[in-house]
Image (cartoon, grey):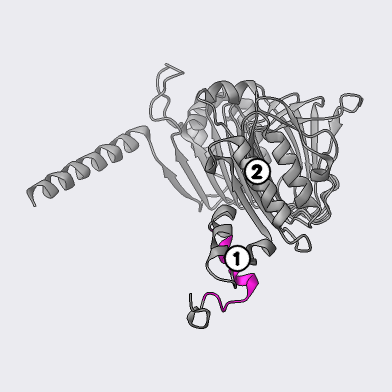
Amino acid sequence: MNVEDDRLSSLPDDLIHKILSFIGTEHAIQTSVLSSRWRFIWTSMPYLNLSHDDFFRLPTFSKFFTRVLSDRNNQSDMTSVKLSVHGHGTYLVVKQIMAYAFSHNIQQLNLGFSCNIDFEFPLCLFRSRSLKHLSLTTEDFSSNGYRRKFSFTYVFKATSTWDLPALTTLYIHDVYLCYDENTDELFIDLFSKCANLKNLTLKGCYTKGFTGLSICLPLLTELTLETEYGSVEVFNIVAPQLKNLTIRSFISESHEYLISAPHLVFLDYKGWSCLQLSTNAFLSLEKAHICISYSTYAHQVLRLLQQIRNVKFLTLNLEVVELLSSFVEQLAHLPSPFANLKSLKIHPERERLKVREHKRVEMSAEVRSYLLDGSPGATFTMVSREDIKSMKKLAENLRTVRIARAGES
């Protein structure tokens, strides 16, 4: 290769490192044969991207990453690690790589891990002064994904408060969160020492050893809680800067959410039962999407609507309206809570009622009055199940016509 005519080789090392980060560590190392200019560039790369799937056997993978760590420039920081590993024995690989990364000022860690034994993270993961972005995911490499997901055969264990002062983004999916079994505390705050956390996602996690989880974060702006299993019954959320809150709950157990978020702008809830919420009202609430699949308790829905009374753009599922229409006597003497409403949209969550085989209930005048009388200027849009069926039928007809025209041409 003529280095003088090679524009890529003339780029500064940090830019070449960034380019190589998109092709994975294994392929980045292979560029060392291009010329003397490229021979040692990979050794100072601050990015590590390894996947067990790129290797046939664990010993081969283990030998490769050992060589990478030993040949790498030990004076260079490792700011980003993306690691996907699975199978018995891989926890040793994970521990070794993480120990190296955390001793080299890691800032971003994305770990997808699956093992057939419980794996307790090393303390270095929860005691980093440099880590800014952390993603932990239990991946499913088995043929029986359903069994893994609901029996939690593959788990992570986190047994203490996380001391990550630089962390701004935390994503945890299918992770087993257990507290110190010797503690008498029932309400804990795993993230109290993550003062700079702005974006937090807990998805499909399993909890043990405590019944209440506190999330008290002064800078948190984005929070997602999705289908949490296990011992936790109450979420205590204190987040003065929280803007967007997403909650998904598709389990039989109901959770209670104690929320102090005066600057909340968007609330997105979807679940089997009604959202059990305790709050002083969201004074800054702009939008709310509420979808409740199977609730039979109208008083719970009315309480929730009262709690989000300051909303300006509200979307409800049709099943909620049908529930309220079945209990119009409860609405007869209730004033509309919505004084700031600008738009109300109603749409069905299910095209067909497969669970509740009762006669279809239309939206009553009492429900309409309850939802809209407080804001007579609000726009109102309602989509019925028949509308959805008609739209699907029209889409199918258009598709048939396109296929027929394509065949003619």
Task: Give percent across and percent down for residue 68.
Answer: 67, 52
Mark 2 surroundings within 10 Å by alpha-carbon count, few (fewer than 14), some (14 through 19), many (20 or more): few
Secondary structure under tag 1 reads helix
Q: Quadrant of residue 225?
A: top right
Specify the amino acid type for callout 2: Lys
Q: Residue at x 69, y 64 (%)?
A: 44
Q: Residue furthest left?
A: 408
Q: Which mark is residue 63?
A: 2
Mark 1 surroundings within 10 Å by alpha-carbon count, few (fewer than 14), some (14 through 19), many (20 or more): few
Q: Viewer-nearest of labels 2 and 1?
A: 2
Q: Residue at x 53, y 43 (%)?
A: 54
Considering only vertical position in the picture, is 400 above or below 283? above
Considering only vertical position in the picture, is 241 above or below 353? below
Indicate left or right for 298 with 129 as reference.
left
Question: Can residue 217 be seen in the rendering of this structure?
Answer: yes
Task: Give percent across and percent down for residue 240.
Answer: 78, 52
Q: Magenta residues?
A: 8-22
Task: Give percent across and percent down for residue 121.
Answer: 77, 37
Closest to the observer, 35 or 287: 35
Question: Can residue 251 be seen in the rendering of this structure?
Answer: no
Task: Give percent across and percent down for residue 127.
Answer: 85, 47
Q: Residue at x 54, y 58 (%)?
A: 30
Sequence order check: which comes first, mark 2 or mark 1? 1
Q: Residue at x 60, y 65 (%)?
A: 18
In the rendered structure, does residue 86 fall within the stretch colored magenta?
no
